[in-house]
Amino acid sequence: MTSLATGDAAGAPAANPVAKTQKNGEPRALLHRIHVVAGILVAPLLVIAAVTGVAYALAPSIEKVVYHEELTATSGLPAQPLEKQVEVAQRVHPELPVTAVQVPEKPGQTTRVMFNDEQLKSESYRHAVFVDPGDLSIKGDLVQYGSSAALPLRAWISEGHRRLWIDSNFGRLYSETAASWMGALAIGGLWLWWDRSRRKRTQGTSKRAHHMRRHANVGVAVSVGLLFLTVTGLTWSWVAGTGIAKLRETMDWYAPKPAVTATAPANYDWSEADSVMNLARAEGLSGKVELTPPEAGTVWMAKEAREEWRMGIETVTVDGSTGAMVDRIHFADWPLPAKLTEWLINAHMGILFGWVNQLVLALIGVALLAMIVRGYAMWFGRGRGGRPGRFPVPTRWRDIRPGVAAAVVALLIAYSVVAPLFGVTLVGFVIIDWAWRKLRRG
């Protein structure tokens, strides 16, 4: 980190404007420079993440409008047996296997009959045939994505937010880098704001000072939200997410799986579906429930689907040949880390608290965009003639107390362990900063 921390800025005046900080042996100048340099370089990724993130946050509500016809059962008639609903759906895709049925609880909603198709992008994508349970009319046929049951528009927005519509893990590097630095910039910005506040520095009246106040105030206001998005975003990421998944597996932090072993023959009949569904409802499963037929040696599974305002997932397994319950998993039995993961992920997707959740996420995204605009305005405010200004003057490691310097390095290393792409790109920024100053010096 020598280039971010040592040397002189090209063309800088002899008087060092951060001399007081250096003399006191505090890391403000170093952290300020990292915050500014990294912020300017990472901002384009954060802009993409924020714009797609706002769309992603609002997508669950937009989806209800765009696909209103498919989602709405208009017959007003009592629901017919699931066997008949599956039968009419199979006429749409006679060549594909039925893998599940998503059954609504409220009247006026369609049943989704799910089909696997190896021609789709991945196993996370399935065909969903929407059936009016009353008159068995087909209301639509769409491709559905993931456990959140995202329909095509929301799935497309999700792909952009997660991987820039690039069909490889390379695309996921953008979102992971953005998430990693968003958290680091939020933490660093909070420290800079706190340090400035405790020094009781007087605020200037220039346009740049105005931008700085707004940038800092908005940053403090949404800092918890930014850190939340960082933590939950890294859980889904490629590099950091793999490490987090291994940790969860090692510590047994996943949701418990119900027993599914069957003593009955492997074959099943969709005529069993209604009795399985009735037992699930009797056991307290509410809202939309996904019913999965048995495979060889297993039994039926009824599991509550992810929905808005749902605080937990309940699951039962049932032997369809006897109608007896095999196992029951209560959400209360989940390990606390698994519960937290479920809640946080659902909140990140804008599902946990419905439209309130979505509005808060959208406001955080807009606030992030506003901070980026203010940040660039401050940078250009340091320059002349519409050109960007200089970066903050570097400090030197020897001017920072050894204990403080060691603490800063330890924190950077620790964060890099959690978010490896932060560490990799930090090294890259050090090299870019060093090369830039060498170029300016000629």
Image (tube, helix red, strand yellow):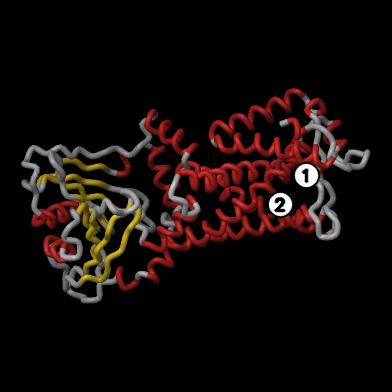
For the N terminus, the image quarter is top right
Find residue 35 and report its horizontal and vertical position in percent.
70, 43
Instruction: Return the mark for residue 216.
Output: 2
Where residue 93 sits: x, y (%)?
Answer: 20, 61
Residue reaching furthest top?
A: 402
Q: Nearer the viewer, residue 279 or 137?
A: 137
User: Image point 11% across, 55% down: which residue?
Assistant: 270
| Residue visible at 44% across and 36% down in the picture | 242
Q: Amino acid at mark 2?
A: Ala
Q: Is residue 147 visible to us here?
A: no
Question: Mark 1 sits on what residue?
Answer: 196
Q: How busy is the neighbourhood of tag 1: few (under 14 within 10 Å), some, or many (20 plus)?
A: few
Dot 2 crowding, Cα within 10 Å, few <14, some 14–19, many 20+: some
C-alpha separation, residue under disc 2 versus residue under disc 1: 10 Å
Local SS, label 1? helix
Q: Are marks 2 and 1 in contact (CB under 8 Å)?
A: yes
Name the foreground residue: 388 vs 75: 388
At label 1, the amino acid type is: Arg
